[in-house]
């Protein structure tokens, strides 16, 4: 029993003090990935999250799918899914949760954090104050947990603000911006008109409905907005697309999106219940009679509030021109996606999206405060203009940036540095190296590591896949859209190709060889050769010789222009680094198969060439008259672990019954860890919730493999791998003169492939 008498002085709450290496405020996807990355590198971390679950806008409280540069596979950013921890989470979510249940994603995020002994997780805990050690330095942070009535005093040499609204950076006095810059400040032609379009993106609220199989009554609450049919934009609402797809239920861009967030939420509730009342009670939707309202969000998904100033501000031209940065640590590729401030109450379309021709680099200088010397900033509050923020704000991009921040903090601790010092060349190359080793992807930056052992070994393989073509064992499909087979070609004469066609009426077929203007992009805008071929009636082989000399290794597009009288034969064989794309568009992120940008907004015009999602997504059947050597064993050591200029993979021949790779050194090596990089199809967007996926494992990924030492001892055997990166860490160094990796083909029609091997 506890009994206390009256006290004249006020009582104090219980207070716990923590002294750690890194304090992270905010447990959305950015803060979560930041904490996991830092903890795995040995930092003691406190992760402070003001909600009962992790994931922020991706959590079960809000239920927005996680996306980034892949943009629903609706742009030309091939193999652009983010790497590292965010990739690990998305692949694991696919494996456990292909249905897209947000509650399962919650469990995955909590599990990933709880498995790291270096993380102290404080849920339901909000930062409310900070103390400075100097005018430009944070000494400690104060947080309060409403569930256990405990205050926390958190001290660290380094802090990360991943809170979304930037509460820590704000309290610390860091320079910030809210709203849109004028067009002339950063020469941004896409900058919105402040009066008619507005300066801020609003909040959104989502809901789920369920068919119960029996009539369900709905009596709307008194605060529901029953005037929705009179709204200017109501006629364009797709009410059949009920549920969490209603991202356009947006409001608040004309308000203070920080201090009026609760007011905005109430208005969104009025809209949601008004929409449901209309669906249920207007008499215009009889098929909704048996549906019930299963879930309505209680907190809105917030898009925009403060953005804090770093040593560099990312702007429109950085994205559109795909500028290269010496301190590049991450990348983006979502469209420059701005929303009108009036949201559902305005007349303008719900968003204006303009895509870049490829992904763009993001520099470290955007990820720390230029005023507070020991404060990193990450998530949606990084240093960017409002226009650039339209692209960088999405969750997978935020998480990828946060992983870079975490690794930067690791080096800061080791070398006793502050964030800005890392931009010096020596430190930056070390940071980039560590990021790439951990699975992070930085476009155009390969791994260069003198300490890595595998590249110095003599390598032998059981076989190497030589691409002679793909069998015609798949469906016939009408040539309703321009269709192109992507091929990584090397310098020399372009090989001739034979395709299988079925012709319903004698006609002509236009074919072309295309490529991108900028190497590393996948926007086929340059027409190198065009030919018009005569076709006769019936099924036939079509030989194409472009008579063209390839100047350098990169991806080329063998394109067929639309002809309703022609069908092309496809193949069921799936291959790492091969894709067929179509001149189509994804209505989720575009309105046409061509982005036709007005002259006055500073964006490019170009065609979209998109792959289809599985179970579609087959390659064309074809025969090469000179085989492609696109899977050479040397690819394993070029420091790029996804397709880029070429496949960047080694693949075994399909008839190889026991594919293996063997590394031999001339003397004994002491190896602490081995890293293997598998193909989990970085072209697949892996949306985390609602949409669902037809598969739980990526068909290219090797599931079963084992690793042997020079005496034939099995160091590990894995039967159920589904992850991109496998790390074998030894308790004590392994002394061996060789390593042998034995793989199994993922399927009879999918050859075993590997992007890279690292040994340390």
Image (spheres, rainbow, N blue to C red):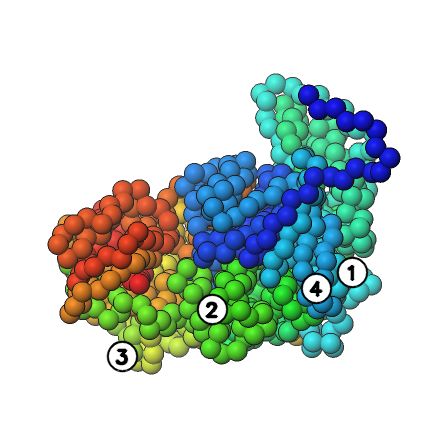
Mark 2–mark 3 Cα distance, whole angstroms, equals: 37 Å
| Residue position for label 2 | 431
Q: Which dot, 2 or 3, sits closer to the camera?
A: 2
In-image side of 698 versus 359 (left or right): left
Question: x, y percentage for residue 373?
Answer: 65, 69
| In front of the other: 605 or 129 | 129
Q: Which dot, 4 or 1, sits closer to the camera?
A: 4
Q: Quick check: 324 above or below 729?
A: below
Q: Are marks 4 and 2 in contact (CB under 8 Å)?
A: no
Numbered label attached to residue 198: 1
In-image side of 82 versus 494 (left or right): right
Quarter of the figure with residue 468: bottom left
Mark sitting earlier along the chain (3/1): 1
Mark sitting earlier along the chain (3/4): 4
| In front of the other: 14 or 403 | 14
Q: Which dot, 4 or 2, sits closer to the camera?
A: 4
| Residue position for label 3 | 492
Which residue appears at 27% of the width and 57% of the height? 733
Q: Quick check: 289 above or below 367?
A: above
């Amino acid at each position: 029993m506890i009994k206390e008498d009256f006290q004249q002085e006020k009582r104090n709450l219980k207070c716990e003090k923590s002294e750690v290496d890194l304090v992270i405020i905010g447990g959305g996807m950015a803060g979560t990935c930041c904490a996991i990355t830092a903890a795995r590198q040995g930092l003691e971390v406190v992760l402070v999250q003001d909600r009962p679950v992790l994931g922020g806008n991706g959590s079960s409280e809000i239920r927005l799918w996680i996306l980034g540069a892949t943009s629903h596979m609706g742009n030309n950013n091939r193999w652009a899914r983010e790497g590292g921890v965010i990739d690990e989470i998305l692949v694991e979510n696919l494996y456990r949760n292909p249905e897209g249940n947000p509650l399962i994603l919650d469990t995955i995020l909590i599990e990933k954090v709880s498995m790291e002994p270096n993380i102290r997780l404080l849920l339901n805990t909000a930062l409310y104050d900070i103390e400075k050690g100097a005018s430009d330095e944070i000494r400690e942070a104060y947080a309060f947990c409403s569930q256990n009535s405990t205050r926390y005093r958190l001290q660290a040499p380094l802090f990360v603000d991943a809170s979304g609204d930037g509460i820590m950076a704000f309290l610390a006095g860091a320079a910030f911006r809210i709203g849109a810059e004028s067009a002339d400040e950063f020469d941004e032609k896409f900058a919105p008109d402040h009066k008619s379009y507005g300066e801020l993106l609003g909040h959104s609220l989502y809901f789920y409905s369920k068919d119960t199989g029996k009539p369900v009554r709905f009596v709307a609450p008194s605060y529901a907005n029953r005037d929705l049919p009179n709204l200017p934009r109501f006629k364009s609402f797709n009410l059949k697309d009920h549920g969490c797809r209603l991202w356009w239920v947006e409001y608040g861009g004309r308000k203070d999106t920080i201090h009026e967030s609760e007011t905005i939420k109430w208005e969104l509730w009025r809209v949601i219940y008004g929409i449901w009342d209309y669906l249920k009670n207007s008499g215009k939707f009889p098929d909704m009679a048996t549906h019930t309202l299963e879930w309505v969000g209680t907190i809105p998904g917030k898009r925009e509030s403060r953005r804090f100033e770093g040593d560099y501000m990312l702007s429109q031209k950085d994205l559109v021109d795909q500028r290269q940065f010496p301190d590049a640590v991450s990348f983006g590729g979502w469209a420059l996606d701005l929303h009108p401030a009036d949201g559902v109450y305005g007349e303008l379309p719900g968003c204006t999206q303009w895509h870049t021709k490829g992904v763009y680099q993001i520099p470290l200088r955007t990820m720390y405060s230029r005023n507070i010397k020991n404060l990193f900033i990450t998530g949606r509050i990084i240093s960017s203009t409002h226009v650039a923020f339209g692209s960088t704000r999405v969750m997978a991009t935020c998480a990828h940036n946060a992983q870079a921040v975490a690794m930067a903090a690791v080096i800061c601790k080791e070398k006793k540095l502050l964030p800005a010092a890392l931009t010096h060349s020596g430190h930056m190359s070390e940071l980039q190296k560590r990021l790439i080793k951990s699975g992070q992807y930085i476009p155009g930056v390969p791994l260069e590591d003198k300490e890595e052992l595998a590249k110095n070994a003599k390598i032998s393989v059981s076989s190497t896949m030589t691409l002679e073509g793909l069998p015609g064992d798949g469906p016939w499909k009408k040539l309703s859209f321009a269709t192109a087979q992507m091929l990584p070609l090397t310098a020399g004469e372009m090989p001739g190709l034979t395709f299988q066609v079925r012709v319903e009426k004698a006609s002509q077929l236009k074919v072309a060889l295309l490529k991108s203007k900028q190497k590393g992009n996948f926007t086929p805008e340059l027409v190198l050769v065009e030919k018009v071929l005569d076709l006769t009636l019936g099924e036939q082989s079509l030989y194409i010789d472009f008579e063209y000399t390839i100047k350098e290794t990169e991806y080329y597009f063998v394109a067929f222009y639309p002809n309703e009288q022609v069908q092309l034969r496809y193949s069921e064989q799936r291959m790492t680094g091969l894709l067929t794309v179509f001149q189509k568009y994804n209505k989720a992120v575009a309105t046409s198969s061509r982005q036709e940008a007005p002259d006055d907004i500073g964006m490019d015009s170009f065609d979209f060439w998109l792959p289809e999602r599985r179970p579609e997504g087959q390659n064309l059947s074809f025969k090469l008259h000179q085989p492609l050597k696109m899977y050479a064993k040397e690819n394993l050591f070029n420091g790029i672990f996804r397709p880029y200029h070429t496949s960047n993979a080694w693949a075994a021949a399909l008839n190889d019954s026991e594919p293996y790779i063997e590394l031999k050194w001339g003397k004994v090596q002491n190896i602490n860890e081995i890293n293997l990089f598998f193909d989990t199809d970085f072209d697949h967007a892996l949306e985390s919730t609602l949409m669902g996926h037809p598969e739980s494992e990526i068909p290219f990924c090797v599931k079963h493999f084992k690793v042997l030492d020079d005496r034939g001892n099995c160091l590990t055997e894995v039967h159920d791998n589904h992850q991109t990166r496998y790390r074998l860490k030894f308790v004590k160094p392994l002394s061996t003169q060789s390593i042998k990796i034995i793989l199994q083909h993922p399927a009879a029609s999918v050859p075993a492939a590997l992007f890279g091997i690292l040994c340390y």
